[in-house]
Image: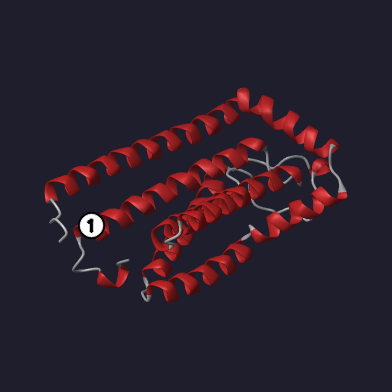
Amino acid sequence: MTSPRRPGKNRQRSGSILVFALAILLGLFALARRIWVSARAGGVPNAWDIPVLDWTTVHRSEPATFLAWFFTIVGDTLGMAIVALCVIGLFSWRTRSLWPGALIAVTAAGSVVLTVVLKHTLGRARPPLDDALFPVPESYSFPSGHSLNSIAILGIIGYLSVLILRSRLARILVLCTLGCFVAGVGWSRIYLGHHWLTDVMGGLLIGGSWVVVVIVLHHFVLLRNQRTVRWLQL
């Protein structure tokens, strides 16, 4: 016979999770803001951007270029949309509910809005065209939309995988694969000369912050409102 759950302990654990998540969120936001301020002021990140771009330009090769285009194409809006739809179908079938699709859709929509708003607000120019492999996007440079959207969408997919998959090995393999892919997308944007290093770093930090927000909201909505959101429950 299982022992009854103690509401006090559950609330205490939930409070700890919330504090930890908010601490991560504030830390990521502070780092992203620091990168942007330093880039605008010509500080330390500019000392990274040009050497990293020069190094990748000198060390380009045909196999690496092919791999970079692969990561960039799959990490683009259309590629991420296809990946998201496939995962939504799989997870919705696995859980027999709509909540995985709703969570991924909210995360994707928020990441796209963040990308568009921040690019137009900050208006940073892309690296020189002489260093870029065409075609080059016409939008602004900071933050990297590929990096922001990929870590947001694949991050929430990783979170859902931890909740849904029963095998610990499967969880580890999925999380490692998703992490490597996000890193590959970020690398490809620098390699192709479409973004500065600090654009990619900013995109990863902002996208990671957005994932933390979604995860916290999901956790506490389910915890506090189980009767009113049954269609979203695991």
Quadrant location of the C terminus?
bottom left
How busy is the neighbourhood of tag 1: few (under 14 within 10 Å), some, or many (20 plus)?
Answer: some
Say which residue appears at 49% left-offset and 72% top-offset.
Answer: 90
Say which residue appears at 66% left-offset and 61% top-offset.
Answer: 74
Q: Measured from the top left, where is residue 95 in percent x and y?
A: 38, 72
Q: Is residue 53 above or below residue 181?
A: above
How many circles with numbers are drawn on the protein?
Answer: 1
Q: Measured from the top left, where is residue 153 in percent x and y?
A: 51, 57
Q: Is residue 155 left or right of residue 43?
A: left
Q: Measured from the top left, where is residue 124 in percent x and y?
A: 62, 40
Say which residue appears at 16% left-offset and 59% top-offset.
Answer: 2
The front one of 169 and 125 is 169
Residue indicated by mark 1: 223
Q: Residue furthest front?
A: 1
Quadrant location of the N terminus?
bottom left
Inspect the image, locate mark 1, and give the three-letter code of the amino acid beneath it: Leu
Q: Is residue 162 left or right of residue 183?
A: left
Q: Secondary structure at mark 1?
A: helix
Say which residue appears at 29% left-offset and 73% top-offset.
Answer: 231
Q: Is residue 181 left or right of residue 69?
A: left
Q: Is residue 54 left or right of residue 170?
A: right
Q: Is residue 234 above or below residue 199?
A: below
Q: Would residue 149 be visible to someone looking at this image?
A: no
Q: Would residue 79 be visible to someone looking at this image?
A: yes
Q: Looking at the image, what colour scheme do you see? A: secondary structure
